[in-house]
Every structure is written in structure tokens, then in C-alpha cells.
Image: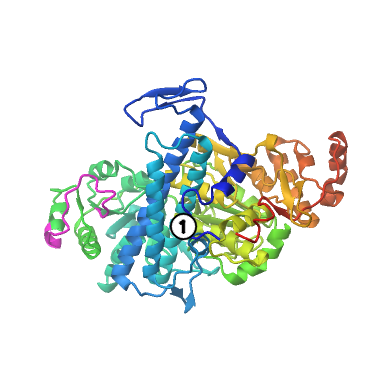
Amino acid sequence: MHSMPAITTLRDWDFLLLKRYSPQYLKKEDECSLCTYGPCHINEKKKGVCGIGLNAHLSKMSLFTAVTGAAGHASLAESITSELIEKFGSDYPLKLNDEPLQTPLIRLICGFKPKVLSEMKKVTSYINREITSLLSVLNMGQEGEWIDFESKTLHAGMLDNLALEVIDMSQIATFKFPSNSPDTPLQNSEFRIQSSEFRNPAILCIGHNSITGIEIMQYLDENNLSEKIDLYGLCCMATDMSRSPKGGVKIAGNQRDQLKFIKSGIANVIVLDSQCIRTDILHHASKMGIPVVATNPECSLGLPDRTGDKTEKIVDDLISQREAGVLIFDKKKIAQVAAETSIKRIKIPNSKFQIPNYKIRVGRGAISDIEIKNVAPPIVMGEIPGIIGFLGCPNYSHENGLLEMARALIDRDYIVTSGGCTAIDLAEVDADGKSLYEETTGKFDAGGFANLGSCVSASHLLGAAIKIASVMLHRPIDGNYKEIADYILNRVGVVIIIWGPMSQKAYATATGANRLGIPVIFGNKGERYGRMLEGNKSCGWEVTDMRNKREVFAGPTPAHLMTTADSPSEALTLAAKLCMRPNDTSKGRQTKLKNYIELDKLFSGSSLPDDIHLFVRTKYDIPPKYEDNVYDKLKKMDWKTVWIPDPTLLKSVEFGKQ
């Protein structure tokens, strides 16, 4: 058991993964300007002046991306926990409906279950300490081998995942957001084309810290302004504000919709927090005459700090446009300034501007223990074909195929989840005024479609995989990272699709999922991260069979840890393939192969995937509908029956004795 692992504690597990899934660097040369030796033009033949080779340099940049993303979520975790402790007290219990909150990631990585809010500080202190170590690694004259850079990249991703759970569990406990709740309500953004519908004063909130938005909601409620002022949210603050029992926020869209909403003229004032904010937002808001209130030291935009000034004076300066915007750190003053500015400012909405209408199921939070116990056996045996999580940024064209992918998987009885900006895109209504969330149940079960919440809700998908492993393995979670990750990799068919990769945070979250044994499929823009983790065919696909301690062939299951797809149909094919696990029963493998064959046909047009023979272990794995075609293929490939193992990548002496 390893509690709060340091940057090399899980190095042996990382090396097992990196041997099977060798990094594929997508550049043949690169320029490094990280120190004054440079710029150095590094390629396969030419090293940098410091001595670093191409693969080591590219893996160093992978760490740079991952640690930057992890730092974004770590900083948010630090600030949110500090603000919540100030608001609710350090001894505030981490409970919901009188039940202790489940924190599987914290338990797995840190080795304990936090009971009160102040104990979250133990976790954030650990995260910050490790991020400092990883930043030190990026210094010139430190690490020099690609494999250790990659191990540290996986460590950065794990820290990112941990920060996600700290954030969401803290706000679930204090603000009483839904958790373990499949039946959350639907919320409609209720946009209409007529400008007359937008005469009410309106506040637009953008960012990731829900505390800022919820403080505004409370102020409006306490001052009987909720019916007089419209409150809109963009990005993750919107999805988290919608989880508040008070309600009252309209989801204006995701990150991509910032300029569209500003140019619509609907907002009287814009309140910014941190992360995923356009860096030129002040410029565009000023062109529309919309005052801006910045609230976070990490996104101050050159604005004057007016925290100590009187509310009336700040509002007058914003209305008169003596100030295009202000910086305020006091949450109550932010709410007052936003409300009074919105009331006093006259606006002229742009009636020609079309804004999508969204109908979204409010984020349900974590997956309940009852749901986990119900799905754990059929997931591990393969009878539920897999769990697919849609996450990520809106970095794709409008015709993105997200809805088609989600529907195809739901129809095939996968468990489908959503979170973050992708969850909002999946909520866009059709010509009949309906969204996918209305057509489906929010349960975490076969054919279910569960919106987990904002970006930080990715922790609940990872937590579900951890709890499934713990239930089936009959082993403790606390500090048991390698054993649980090994179980997930070999037995729990869960895959994440990040169709619009963009931010460093998305890369960090994906990399952390990889360390936990969960494959990630990026849309084609994921190639711009410069590195994938794809199956290394030269090393073979052996696992240790725990029954007889022998190494046996298990097939490429899963075939990749991080890869890309160019089209929705290719992504569906990959998802079906990557849900296969060595432990699948023959009945489960039949279901998974049937999906793989049929989805591959949509992408390639062929009758059978080229690699189908690698996934058939015995004749009982073959879907009856395709028996003749598969047998013909197997004969051509000189196929032989292989043993279905009780699989692990860990050495037999390690398993159960960490």
C-alpha cells in the first residue's frame, strides 16, 4: 500500500504501462527555448546544447502540458477549499443526506477518507507539494530520459484527477449539490429569438469557481431580485450553479459561446472567475459597452483593484464607462456590484443574433454504491459492453457528431456519461424542442445517460471505475493504487472520449485516467498535444494468469491508452474495441465483438475488422450472427484457441501484498 505517493513511488507501474503502450511522438523535430542555451533545433540526429535528445525533449513537453493542466485544477481546489472553510468552518462535515461522502480517488491515492472540510487541506497540500516537484523536473539539467518524463507525466495526471474530486466533493457537501442522484431535474435555457424576451437586466457569469456564482444567486434571492434579474452562466460555473438547490441560473452555453453571447447584447454585466475565459474578453465586452467584473487573482486582466471601494462608487464608474471593468475579491461586494450594475445599465439586445437553446439534466454527481453493486458484475464479465464517458472542450465544428455517437452507444446498452462543456453540447435541442437528456434515463446502468456535472465531475467516472474494482476484487481502496489500476486495465471496460481536446487541463485529466488503466480517445485535434500512448505490438500482449502464474496471450485488450479518431464512426469503432478486456466472459465478448463488427462497418465499410482474429479466444466468443464470416477469417489467419486468463500485469508476488 502506498499513501500519498511521491513522483517515483508508482514508477514501476508506470513502466509496465509504458512498455505495453509506448509513447508515439508526433513530431520529427522541435525547437526548444526553455533556457538561454537555446533556441535549439532538436531532431532524431541532433541533440540540444544541454544534451537532451528528441524523445526526451518531446516527453518533457508532454510533462509541461500535463503539469500546467494539473496546476489549474490544483489551484482551484486550493482556493475553493479555503473559501468554503472560511464560509462554513473547518469542522463542517463532509456529508450529504446524513451519509458520509464517498471519496474513492482520495482514498486510493491519499489512503484516508476525509470526514470534515479541513481534512481536504491535507489533500491539497500533498497535491501542491508534488506539483512543485514536477515543476522542478522541468528545470534545465534535471531529468534526461523519456521514460521517466512519461512516468512523471502520468503522476501529474493523477494529481489532476485528485484535485477534481476535492473540488466537487467539497462543493457537494457544503452547497448540497446532488450526488448519488440519477433523477435530477431538466433545465431549459429558454432562449427565444425575439429581443423583447431579454428586456430584464441580466448578469453573465463565466468561469469555474461556483462559489462566485452561488454568492450572486443568494444575493438575488435575499433581496427579492431573482424574478427581476436574469442570471446566466457559461462553461462550468453554469453547470455547477444549476446544481444549487436554489436554482435560478440559465445555461447560456459552453466555452465556445462566449463571444456569441457577448455580441447578443443580452448581458448587462459580465462576472469572470478563473479558467477557460477568452483572454480578449475585456476588448469584446468594451465594444458592446458591457462592464466586466473580474474576481480572481489568476485572471485580473489589468483591471484596477476596487475591493476596498464603496459599492455605489464602483457601480457609478461602471455605468458611466469611466471604467471598462474592475477587479473585486470580496464575494459579497461582487454580488452587490453585479446586481446594481445590471439594474442601472440600459441595454439593446441584438435581435438578429441566434443563440442555441439547451435542455440539460442537472449534474447528478457521484454514482451511488447501490448502482455500483448492480452494474459491477455485468461490467466485469462484459455483459454490459462498457462505460463511455464524454468529456472535454468544444474544440470542434458545429456538426461534430457528438449526439450521434452518444445515441449509438446508448442504443447498444453501453452506460454513457457526460460532463463539462461536452455535456452542454449534448443538451442542444432539436427542431422539436427536445434534447437527448429528455429521451433517456439518468441512471448509471445499461442504456442510461448520466450527466455527472462540470469538468470536475470527471472524478465521478474515475471513482465509479475504482469502486467497481473494489467491489469485485474484495480488496481495500485505501492506498491501493497499483492493484486497483491493474484490475481496471484488465477487467473494467471503461473508455473516455474527449472529442474536443483543447486545454492543458483536458490533457492532464486524460493522462491521469491512463495511469488508472482507462483508455482515452481524442478527436483529431488531440494530435496537437504531440504524443499518444498506443499499443506496442512488438512487446506482445501477455498477462500473468493468476491461476497458474504463467504468462499467457490476452490479445490487445485494451489496444491503446491514448489515441485519436478522425470521425465519429471511427471513434465509435475504437470505443467498442477499447472496451474489451482480457477478463471478458465468452458471453460478454460475444456482445462486445458484435458491437465492434457492426460499428467498424460504419467506418470502414468492410464486413469484418482486419484485426478480429486477435479478439477471438475460443469459438464461444464468436457472435452467432457473424459465425460463418468470422470462421472464414480465422482460417485465413491460422488462428488457434487461447486460454481465457485470470489476468494481471503485476508480478504474482506483488498482487495482494502491496
Q: Which residue is mark 1?
A: 162
Quadrant showing the N terminus: bottom right
Q: Residue at x 48, y 74 (%)?
A: 100
**SS state under label 1:** helix
Q: Quadrant of the C terminus?
A: bottom right
Question: How many numbered marks, from 0 up?
Answer: 1
Q: What residue is drawn where x is 34% and y is 30%?
A: 35
Q: Is residue 305 magenta?
A: yes
Query: Looking at the image, which residue is at 41% across and 66% down?
Result: 170
Residue most extreme to the front = 653
Label 1: how many Cα within 10 Å (few below 14, some 14–19, many 20+): many
Question: What residue type is disc 1 on?
Answer: Leu
Residue 509, relative to residue 384: is it above or below? above
- For image coordinates 38% across by 53% down, the residue present is 129
Q: Which residues are magenta?
A: 294-313
Towards the viewer: 179 or 471? 471
Question: Residue 318: where, in percent of width, then height?
Answer: 17, 52
Look at the image and say whether residue 559 sits in the magenta stretch: no
Q: Is residue 636 left or right of residue 429?
A: right
